[in-house]
Amino acid sequence: MNRIVLHQGDITQLAVDAIVNAANSSLLGGGGVDGAIHRAAGPELVQECRMLHGCKTGDAKITAGYRLPAKHVIHTVGPVWQGGDSNEDALLASCYQKSLELAEKHGLKAIAFPAISTGIYRFPLERATRIALTTTQNFLKSHALPEQVIFVCFSQHDLEVYRQILAEVHPDT
Ligand code: AR6
Protein backbone atom coordinates (compact mmCIF):
# COMPACT_ATOMS: atom_id res chain seq x y z
CA MET A 1 0.00 0.00 0.00
CA ASN A 2 1.15 3.50 -0.79
CA ARG A 3 1.23 5.17 2.61
CA ILE A 4 1.65 8.70 1.22
CA VAL A 5 -1.28 9.99 -0.84
CA LEU A 6 -1.87 13.37 -2.52
CA HIS A 7 -5.35 14.88 -2.70
CA GLN A 8 -6.67 18.17 -4.04
CA GLY A 9 -9.56 19.76 -2.17
CA ASP A 10 -10.90 21.07 1.12
CA ILE A 11 -9.36 19.37 4.14
CA THR A 12 -12.47 20.04 6.26
CA GLN A 13 -14.39 17.51 4.18
CA LEU A 14 -12.15 14.53 4.84
CA ALA A 15 -13.47 11.69 7.01
CA VAL A 16 -10.12 10.62 8.44
CA ASP A 17 -8.90 9.96 11.98
CA ALA A 18 -7.29 13.40 12.16
CA ILE A 19 -6.85 16.49 10.05
CA VAL A 20 -3.96 18.79 10.86
CA ASN A 21 -4.63 22.48 11.37
CA ALA A 22 -2.06 25.13 10.39
CA ALA A 23 -2.84 27.20 13.47
CA ASN A 24 -1.20 30.14 15.25
CA SER A 25 0.25 30.00 18.76
CA SER A 26 -2.98 31.18 20.41
CA LEU A 27 -4.91 28.16 19.03
CA LEU A 28 -7.97 30.40 19.07
CA GLY A 29 -8.58 30.49 15.32
CA GLY A 30 -7.58 32.71 12.43
CA GLY A 31 -7.82 32.87 8.63
CA GLY A 32 -6.86 30.35 5.95
CA VAL A 33 -7.28 26.66 6.73
CA ASP A 34 -7.51 27.47 10.45
CA GLY A 35 -10.62 29.59 9.89
CA ALA A 36 -12.16 26.94 7.63
CA ILE A 37 -11.57 24.19 10.23
CA HIS A 38 -13.07 26.22 13.08
CA ARG A 39 -16.11 27.16 10.99
CA ALA A 40 -16.75 23.56 10.00
CA ALA A 41 -16.07 22.12 13.47
CA GLY A 42 -18.37 24.56 15.26
CA PRO A 43 -17.89 26.58 18.47
CA GLU A 44 -17.05 23.57 20.65
CA LEU A 45 -13.63 23.42 19.00
CA VAL A 46 -12.50 26.82 20.23
CA GLN A 47 -13.84 25.97 23.68
CA GLU A 48 -11.55 22.95 23.89
CA CYS A 49 -8.68 24.94 22.38
CA ARG A 50 -8.99 27.56 25.14
CA MET A 51 -8.12 24.89 27.68
CA LEU A 52 -4.85 24.06 25.89
CA HIS A 53 -3.26 27.46 26.66
CA GLY A 54 -1.65 27.90 23.28
CA CYS A 55 1.04 26.01 21.40
CA LYS A 56 4.65 26.84 20.57
CA THR A 57 5.90 27.12 17.01
CA GLY A 58 6.96 23.65 15.87
CA ASP A 59 4.80 21.88 18.45
CA ALA A 60 1.39 20.14 18.11
CA LYS A 61 -1.69 19.50 20.26
CA ILE A 62 -4.74 17.31 19.66
CA THR A 63 -8.48 17.94 20.14
CA ALA A 64 -11.72 16.29 19.10
CA GLY A 65 -13.16 17.06 15.67
CA TYR A 66 -16.71 17.97 16.80
CA ARG A 67 -18.89 18.66 13.71
CA LEU A 68 -16.11 17.76 11.26
CA PRO A 69 -16.18 14.41 9.51
CA ALA A 70 -12.65 13.94 10.95
CA LYS A 71 -12.51 12.43 14.45
CA HIS A 72 -9.68 14.65 15.69
CA VAL A 73 -7.86 17.85 14.87
CA ILE A 74 -4.11 18.07 15.42
CA HIS A 75 -3.21 21.74 15.77
CA THR A 76 0.33 22.65 14.86
CA VAL A 77 1.99 26.05 14.55
CA GLY A 78 4.26 26.56 11.57
CA PRO A 79 7.00 29.18 11.41
CA VAL A 80 6.46 32.54 9.74
CA TRP A 81 8.91 32.73 6.80
CA GLN A 82 11.58 35.32 7.58
CA GLY A 83 14.05 34.63 4.79
CA GLY A 84 15.29 31.18 5.82
CA ASP A 85 17.91 32.01 8.46
CA SER A 86 15.62 31.92 11.48
CA ASN A 87 15.41 28.15 11.95
CA GLU A 88 12.32 27.98 9.72
CA ASP A 89 13.26 24.63 8.11
CA ALA A 90 13.74 22.83 11.44
CA LEU A 91 10.59 24.35 12.91
CA LEU A 92 8.51 23.27 9.92
CA ALA A 93 9.98 19.74 10.06
CA SER A 94 9.09 19.67 13.75
CA CYS A 95 5.42 20.46 12.93
CA TYR A 96 5.22 17.31 10.79
CA GLN A 97 7.25 15.21 13.23
CA LYS A 98 5.22 16.19 16.32
CA SER A 99 1.92 15.78 14.49
CA LEU A 100 2.91 12.29 13.34
CA GLU A 101 4.07 11.40 16.87
CA LEU A 102 0.69 12.48 18.26
CA ALA A 103 -1.15 10.44 15.63
CA GLU A 104 0.92 7.39 16.51
CA LYS A 105 0.43 7.88 20.25
CA HIS A 106 -3.35 8.05 19.77
CA GLY A 107 -3.46 4.99 17.52
CA LEU A 108 -4.63 6.97 14.47
CA LYS A 109 -4.54 5.22 11.12
CA ALA A 110 -5.27 8.01 8.63
CA ILE A 111 -4.15 11.62 8.97
CA ALA A 112 -4.36 14.55 6.53
CA PHE A 113 -2.00 17.54 6.38
CA PRO A 114 -2.47 20.91 4.68
CA ALA A 115 0.61 22.71 3.30
CA ILE A 116 1.62 24.17 6.66
CA SER A 117 3.11 27.71 6.63
CA THR A 118 2.81 28.12 2.84
CA GLY A 119 -0.16 30.51 2.92
CA ILE A 120 -0.36 33.50 5.25
CA TYR A 121 3.04 32.56 6.77
CA ARG A 122 4.69 32.76 3.27
CA PHE A 123 7.06 29.76 3.49
CA PRO A 124 8.20 29.00 -0.11
CA LEU A 125 6.05 26.13 -1.37
CA GLU A 126 8.72 23.89 -2.95
CA ARG A 127 11.03 24.12 0.04
CA ALA A 128 8.13 23.43 2.43
CA THR A 129 6.91 20.49 0.35
CA ARG A 130 10.34 18.87 0.38
CA ILE A 131 10.44 19.18 4.19
CA ALA A 132 6.87 17.83 4.55
CA LEU A 133 7.52 14.79 2.36
CA THR A 134 10.99 13.84 3.64
CA THR A 135 10.05 14.24 7.32
CA THR A 136 6.96 12.09 6.80
CA GLN A 137 8.80 9.50 4.76
CA ASN A 138 11.46 9.14 7.45
CA PHE A 139 8.84 8.83 10.19
CA LEU A 140 6.89 6.15 8.32
CA LYS A 141 10.04 4.07 7.81
CA SER A 142 10.24 3.34 11.53
CA HIS A 143 6.55 3.47 12.56
CA ALA A 144 3.53 1.32 11.67
CA LEU A 145 1.14 4.18 12.47
CA PRO A 146 -0.21 6.25 10.91
CA GLU A 147 -0.87 3.78 8.11
CA GLN A 148 -1.81 6.53 5.69
CA VAL A 149 -0.79 10.18 5.35
CA ILE A 150 -2.79 12.35 2.97
CA PHE A 151 -1.31 15.65 1.78
CA VAL A 152 -4.18 17.94 0.93
CA CYS A 153 -3.42 20.56 -1.71
CA PHE A 154 -5.90 23.39 -1.95
CA SER A 155 -5.00 24.38 -5.51
CA GLN A 156 -4.13 22.52 -8.69
CA HIS A 157 -0.77 24.31 -8.69
CA ASP A 158 0.07 23.09 -5.19
CA LEU A 159 -0.86 19.55 -6.24
CA GLU A 160 1.53 19.75 -9.22
CA VAL A 161 4.37 20.85 -6.93
CA TYR A 162 3.66 18.02 -4.47
CA ARG A 163 3.53 15.50 -7.35
CA GLN A 164 6.85 16.64 -8.72
CA ILE A 165 8.62 16.59 -5.36
CA LEU A 166 7.07 13.27 -4.33
CA ALA A 167 8.47 11.75 -7.52
CA GLU A 168 11.87 13.25 -6.67
CA VAL A 169 12.06 11.99 -3.11
CA HIS A 170 10.45 8.72 -4.26
CA PRO A 171 9.11 7.25 -1.06
CA ASP A 172 9.60 3.52 -0.63
CA THR A 173 7.17 3.55 2.28
N1 AR6 B 1 -8.29 22.89 2.89
C1 AR6 B 1 -7.00 22.62 2.58
N2 AR6 B 1 -6.04 23.56 2.47
C2 AR6 B 1 -6.41 24.84 2.68
C3 AR6 B 1 -7.74 25.20 3.02
C4 AR6 B 1 -8.69 24.17 3.12
N3 AR6 B 1 -9.97 24.42 3.44
N4 AR6 B 1 -7.77 26.57 3.17
C5 AR6 B 1 -6.52 27.02 2.92
N5 AR6 B 1 -5.71 25.97 2.62
P1 AR6 B 1 -2.73 29.09 5.67
P2 AR6 B 1 -0.22 29.22 7.25
C6 AR6 B 1 -4.27 25.97 2.29
O1 AR6 B 1 -2.60 30.52 5.31
O2 AR6 B 1 0.53 29.73 6.08
C7 AR6 B 1 -4.11 31.51 9.96
O3 AR6 B 1 -4.63 32.79 10.17
C8 AR6 B 1 -3.66 27.23 1.75
O4 AR6 B 1 -3.95 27.37 0.37
O5 AR6 B 1 -4.04 28.56 6.07
O6 AR6 B 1 0.39 28.12 8.08
C9 AR6 B 1 -3.59 30.89 11.25
O7 AR6 B 1 -4.38 31.23 12.36
C10 AR6 B 1 -2.19 26.92 2.00
O8 AR6 B 1 -1.71 26.06 0.97
O9 AR6 B 1 -1.70 28.70 6.89
C11 AR6 B 1 -2.20 31.47 11.35
O10 AR6 B 1 -2.23 32.78 11.89
C12 AR6 B 1 -2.19 26.14 3.30
O11 AR6 B 1 -3.55 25.74 3.50
C13 AR6 B 1 -1.75 31.54 9.89
O12 AR6 B 1 -2.95 31.62 9.13
C14 AR6 B 1 -1.73 26.91 4.52
O13 AR6 B 1 -2.15 28.27 4.43
C15 AR6 B 1 -1.00 30.30 9.47
O14 AR6 B 1 -0.49 30.48 8.19
Image: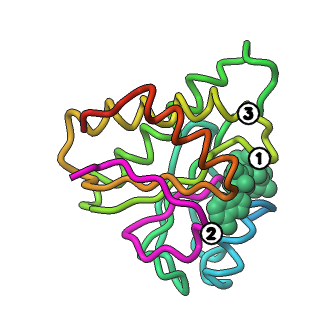
Disc 2 to disc 1, C-alpha distance:
14 Å
Disc 3 to disc 1, C-alpha distance:
7 Å
The mark closer to the camera, 3 or 2, is 2
Instruction: Report the amino acid beneath label 3.
Output: Phe
Residue 34: image location, x then y, percent: 70, 62
Residue 31: image location, x then y, percent: 81, 62
Q: Quadrant of residue 103?
A: bottom left
Q: Earlier in the sequence, mark 3 or mark 2?
A: 2
Whether tag 3 and tag 1 are in contact, CB under 8 A, the answer is no
Per the image, the residue denoted by label 1 is 119
Image disc number at residue 123: 3
Of the four image quadrants, the one with ligand 1 is: bottom right
Q: Secondary structure at mark 3?
A: loop
Q: Earlier in the sequence, mark 2 or mark 1?
A: 2
Label 2 CA crowd tier, 10 Å (few <14, some 14–19, many 20+) = some
Residue range corresponding to the magenta coloring:
1-28
Q: Residue at x 67, y 58 (%)?
A: 154
Instruction: Report the amino acid beneath label 2.
Output: Asp
Residue 70 lies, with reference to residue 21, above or below; the image says below
Q: Residue at x 61, y 66 (%)?
A: 9
Per the image, the residue denoted by label 2 is 10
Image disc number at residue 86: none
Q: Is mark 1 within 8 Å of ligand 1?
A: yes
